[in-house]
Amino acid sequence: MICNLNPLSFKGFGTVSPERTADALLANLPKVRELVVGRIQAPVYRAEAEIWLQSRGGMVALSVSKDGTNFQHYYLDKLVCINPGIYYCLSPFQQDSASVQLFTDTPICETGEFRQVDNYHLPQELWVNGLYTFFYHEKELGFVFPGEAHSVLELTYVDQGSLHSVADGTDLLLEQGDMVIYAPNQWHMQYADIDVAPRYVTISFDLGGGDLTPLYGRKLHPSQSTISLLQAMLKEQERMDPYSADLIISQLTQLLLRLLRQSDDSPQKLKASNSLHAENEIIRRAQQYISNHIREKLSVPLVARMVDVSPSYMTALFQKNLQISPGEYIRRIKLQESKQMIRENSMNFTEIATALQYSTVHHFSRQFKDKFGITPSEYAKSVR
C-alpha cells in the first residue's frame, strides 16, 4: 500500500522538505541527475551520502528500506532527502514510465538487486466470493434436521433457545449467542431438545481467498460487536435495496475476520479485555433472562435488577453493543414468540396477547404489523 509522504511517516528514512521552502532548497542543492524509471524491474540503490530527489514527470512510487528487504512505499509528491545507508527504489505508479530528479555530489550506488514492481494496493487476506442462502429459522418444539453435506461453507448462529449441532461424530450444544461453521463437504445434522423451539440463522457461502480452518468444528462465542454485524445483515435483508447485497457480503467478511482475530487472541490479550467480556456477560445474562421469561411482564428495571446492574447502565450496554434499547429488544423478542404461538395454533389472538402481557389485542396486532408488515391473521393464514 502507498503511504502518505510526510515528516512523521518518513521519519527514520530521511526528511521531507516543506513545500513552501522547496524552491529555496533546490537552488542550493548539488548537481542534478535525471533518472527514467520503468515498470519491468526497478533497481535497488543504497544512499552512500544524503541524496535529494523529487518527481520530474509522471507519478512516482518511492520505496525505502533499512535492510534492503522490507520496503515501505510512498507517493513521491514532495522534495525529500534520503539518509545515508537507506536502500531506495523508484518506480512508476500506475503507468509505464516516469522520471525523477536526483541531487547528490556522490555517485549513485546500485546494489545489483531488483524489485518486482507491483500495483501497491492493500492486499486482502480473506474475502467472501459468493453468498447463496441467508435464512432466519423459527422451528417447532423438538425439531430434527436429518443432515446434509454440500460444497459451500455454512454458518449457524443461535438467536433464541438452543440447538444441537452434530458433525464428525461430535454433538455440540449451541446455546443462545453461540455459532458454528461447517467446512465444505462436511456432513452435519441439527436437532432441538423435545421442549425447545429454537430460532437460528444459517448462511451458506464460499470464499474467494482466505482460510477458516481454525474455526471449523468449534463452538464459537462471538463478541457483541460480531453479533451486531449479523443483526445488521438481517436488517439489510429486510431492506434489500440495490446496495443491500454488497453490504451483506461485506458485513459477512467483517464477521469472519472478527472471528478469526478472536480465535488468535492470546491469553494475555484476553486478560487485557476483561471489561469487554464482563459487558458481554451482562448482555448475555439479560438476553437469557428475557428469553426464559418472555411470557411474563417484563420491564427494563426488572431485567436490570435480575442481572445486578442499573437500568441506565444496561441501556448503555445494549445501545453500545447491540444498537438497540433493552425495551425495544424485549418488544422484538415478544413478537418473535407470538409467531411461534400462532404457528402452534393452540391459542387465539386475544389469548396470545394476554399470555405475552400486552395491554390489549389491538396493541399486540398493531405492533405485530409494524414489525412484520402483515397482521397476525395474515401471518396465520400463511403458515397453516
Image (tube, rainbow, N blue to C red):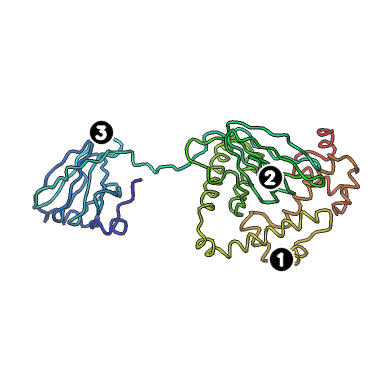
CB-based contact (under 8 Å), mark 1 and mark 3: no
Disc 1 designates what residue? 311
Question: Between marks 2 and 1, how big is the CA–CA gap?
Answer: 38 Å
Disc 2 designates what residue? 171
Counting residues from the N terminus, which is met first, the one under dot 1 or under dot 3?
3
Give the residue at x 27% y 41%.
59
Question: Between marks 1 and 3, how big is the CA–CA gap?
Answer: 63 Å
What is the crowding at mark 2: few (fewer than 14 residues within 10 Å), some, or many (at least 20)? some
Please state which of the two labelled residues, at mark 2 or mark 1, is closer to the viewer.
2
What is the crowding at mark 1: few (fewer than 14 residues within 10 Å), some, or many (at least 20)? some
Displayed quadrant of residue 97 = top left
- Left or right: residue 156 versus residue 160 is left
Give the residue at x 31% y 59%.
8
Which SS class for mark 3?
loop
Which SS class for mark 2?
strand
Q: Amino acid at mark 3?
A: Asp
Which SS class for mark 1?
helix
Badge number at residue 82: none
Counting residues from the N terminus, which is met first, the one under dot 2 or under dot 1?
2
Disc 3 designates what residue? 96
Q: Residue furthest front?
A: 169
- Left or right: residue 112 versus residue 128 is left
- Left or right: residue 20 versus residue 177 is left
Q: Position of residue 141 (x, y in %)?
A: 81, 43
Q: Amino acid at mark 2?
A: Asp
Displayed quadrant of residue 349 = top right
Give the residue at x 34% y 42%.
120
Q: Amino acid at mark 1?
A: Pro
- Left or right: residue 86 versus residue 176 is left
Q: Position of residue 335 (x, y in %)?
A: 78, 47
Q: Position of residue 265 (x, y in %)?
A: 51, 56
